[in-house]
Amino acid sequence: VPLLAIVLTLLGAVGLFVLAGQTLGLIDVAVPAIMVAIGLCDAIHLVHAFEVARRDGAGRTRAILRSLRAVGQACLFTSVTTAVGFLSLLVADHPAVPVFGVKAALAVVWTFLAVIALVPALLALWPERPARIARVPGIRLGALPGVRHALVGALVLVAFVISGTSRLRIDA
């Protein structure tokens, strides 16, 4: 649900940018990443609160309302303060930075609105998965299947990035 909500949010934002005649400059390519980071956090908080409410016996509609009450205000405050932070870039001297600040602020507001609308709608329609065991005592992280392979892959990727970073040249 969170990933689908973010994909739909990004598609909507791209559509709005195109309709507004906007382009993405070099600095603006960070906007989708900002949207993913903020939107996924909000969506995951909503889904978790929904699952807690369902586990406590609330019906689907009641669980959606409880999740919105539980985390909606916190998501709103974090989105508003983040948007205001990006708007503070309006005082920057470089011409591209204030434009980026406005685009990022609008993207943050759009992301909040889209996620707060899409996640509850998706939760209302999405087939429920069986309840999971919250914790399994006595299992070490390295003992879980696939974790060692994932760690080795991540270390190889980090080594690759570090080796490439040392050769990076920035021509501004």
Image (cartoon, rainbow, N blue to C red):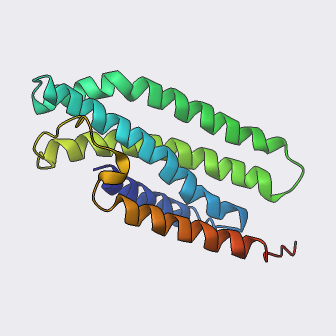
Q: Nearer the viewer, residue 81 or 138?
A: 138
| In front of the other: 70 or 121 | 70
When asked about the image quadrant of residue 87, the answer is top right
Disc count in the image? Answer: 0
Instruction: Residue 28: give x, y in percent of width and height.
Output: 66, 61
- In the picture, the quarter occupied by the C terminus is bottom right
Q: Position of residue 170 (x, y in %)?
A: 84, 73
Give coordinates of residue 171: x percent, y percent.
87, 75
Q: Quadrant of residue 47?
A: top left
Residue shown at 50%/64% (left/top)?
A: 154
Which sits in the foreground, 52 or 133?
Answer: 133
List x then y, in percent, for residue 151. 45, 61
Q: Relative to the observer, which residue lies in front, 10 or 37?
A: 37
Seen in the picture, residue 141 relative to 32 is either above or below; the reply is above
**Apparent side of residue 158 relative to residue 76 in the rendered image (left or right):** right
Residue occupying image coordinates x 57% and y 32%: 80
Task: Give the vertical position of 46 relative to 101 (above or below).
Answer: above
